[in-house]
Amino acid sequence: MKQLFALALLFSFFTQYSFSQCTETQSPKVLLVGDSWAFFMGVDGTINNAFKKWGFSNYKFLTNSTIAENGAQTDDFLTTTKQNEIKRMLDENPSIKVVHLSIGGNDVLGRWKVSYSAAKTDSIKQEVSDRLVQVIDFIKSCKPGIRILWSGYCYPNFGEVIPTSGLGSNHPFNGTWQKMEYPTFIQINTLLNQFSDEVDSFAQIDPQVDFVKATGLMQYTYGQPQPLGVAPGGTYPAFTVPLPEGDPNYPSPKSSMRDYLITKDCFHLSAKGFQDLNEYHTQKFYHKYLMDDKFYLAEGNGKSGTVSSLGNTADSLVMGEDNGEKFSTVLTFNTTSMADTSLSNASIFLRRKSLSGTNPISNSLEVKIKSGNFGATANIEAADFTDNGDAAGTPCLFGSNGGDGHWIRLDLPATFFPFINKNAETQFVISAPTATGGSVVFSDWQDAEFAPILNLAYYNPLLSIKDVQATNTVEIFPNPANNTLRISTNFSTKQTIEIFDVTGRKILSQNVVETEPIDISNLLNGIYFATVKTGAGSFTKKFVKQ
């Protein structure tokens, strides 16, 4: 008990010190693998940019020229060179949770022709899909429980870029278009949608594979403000075509393609285009997946909103000052389902919807916390503005404060942690006490993709320093798990596994050999810690039973 208490004090010291300094270290969370699309994403840094815009300025991707290569096809990632490099990077960076995989596009474009029959076309798609699955299976074998996001592709633009370039047959992409027998927009877009749907079908049945279809995304984010240079001509505004397919009769807009000064690319997106794609991936997948042990969306129905110094209230989320009236944002999170445990970190994510006047978001924000509710009720009321709550402090401001649609992340002081528990809802009041002449509106609770988030990381007192350093030696999978759990170690001898709940209570203990199934069907859904004891020591890993 004394040892655990000492560890807790040590942890509290480092936590409070780091918060007072408000520094963060970027942790690798994504390994970028694939073809020229992966290569350009790496060169442009668009995954990091998207993460920062969505509040994860503490996360980053890793890649290199071996595993993200121009012109690469699925066959290339079945070779020893590329597979060894993927495994090495995953082994050396255990914090990576996702492999962002872009592969298959060159296979399809390089082998398909307009004159091929439907049966021949289906055969090509199936062959590429089969090799893609082989690549995915290899990645899964490198790190049990790893998630793979297949990024997919957006519509190309051969049919407008080349004829309007003035280069004719000298255009660098004319040979590719010619080999495909000059497909029309609808022909090549239909092929891409069909191939995407095949991968989507596979992702639907494999819990470790994700796919966010976005073939028409460039049409959506760019629009076609100038008439298309070839048939069918016409224009359409940005943010009007339906996602994910947009209008297959049109290409991705020429303005979204990579610019080489003398001409445009026909298949690769501009840096902004890749930025849009990775932001969409973040919106649909990464943002929630990269949260910690538990996250909550802000409550609505009068429990989240605005309170002002003059006693005015509103359902919208406003913070700042206007004509002498100060506005504070009140957020309520129903934390009654959280584990009965202490926390190692807690953060609030907020998306800026609009700004009026001077930006009030700065390092001088103030947050108050209340276990239960400020004032007399959980609903927004005038008393919330002056109620001191249980604790108050200055959070560490991270993420992006660069414009509308950007997310800030407020890392809360450790002194708040005891008041975030399962005994009651948790309320926060967020203010900018020194701000004048401006106010910001945050996205409210109505859209789950943009709603305020309370992100919680549980503290695990079972981990010693040795455990933390050696977690790469033992893997537990699948994670999350349903009815069975397996372990993978570097040791050939029999091991003992002990499973603890978040309170430290031992739930299960048994001897196992590597990959032998462990029955956890009787465990309640939640977070557990598995300690594997071997001749080399004990190693603890966290897993989720669902």
Image (tube, rainbow, N blue to C red):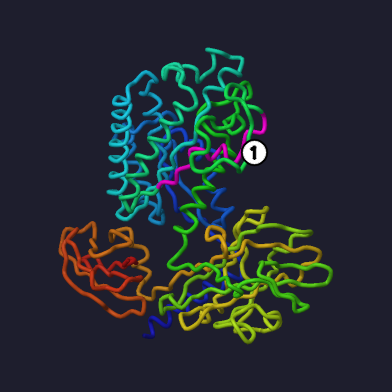
Element at label 1? loop
Q: Is residue 216 magenta?
A: yes
Where residue 264 sits in the image (x, y, percent)? 58, 25
Residue in the image at 41% along x and 17% along y: 179
Q: Position of residue 350 (x, y in %)?
A: 60, 63
Q: How many marks?
A: 1
Viewer-nearest residue: 414 or 485: 485
Instruction: Say which quadrant the N terminus sits in.
Output: bottom left
Q: Which residues are magenta?
A: 211-226
Can residue 474 be seen here? no
Percent position of residue 536, x then y: 24, 65
Q: Nearer the viewer, residue 523 or 443?
A: 443
Question: Which residue occupies the foreground of this view, 232 or 375?
Answer: 232
Q: Is residue 389 above or below residue 168?
A: below
Which quadrant of the figure has residue 275?
top right
Question: What residue is shown with label 1?
Answer: 237
| Residue 239 sits in quarter | top right
The picture quadrant where one finds residue 508 is bottom left
In the rendered image, is residue 256 in sight? Answer: yes
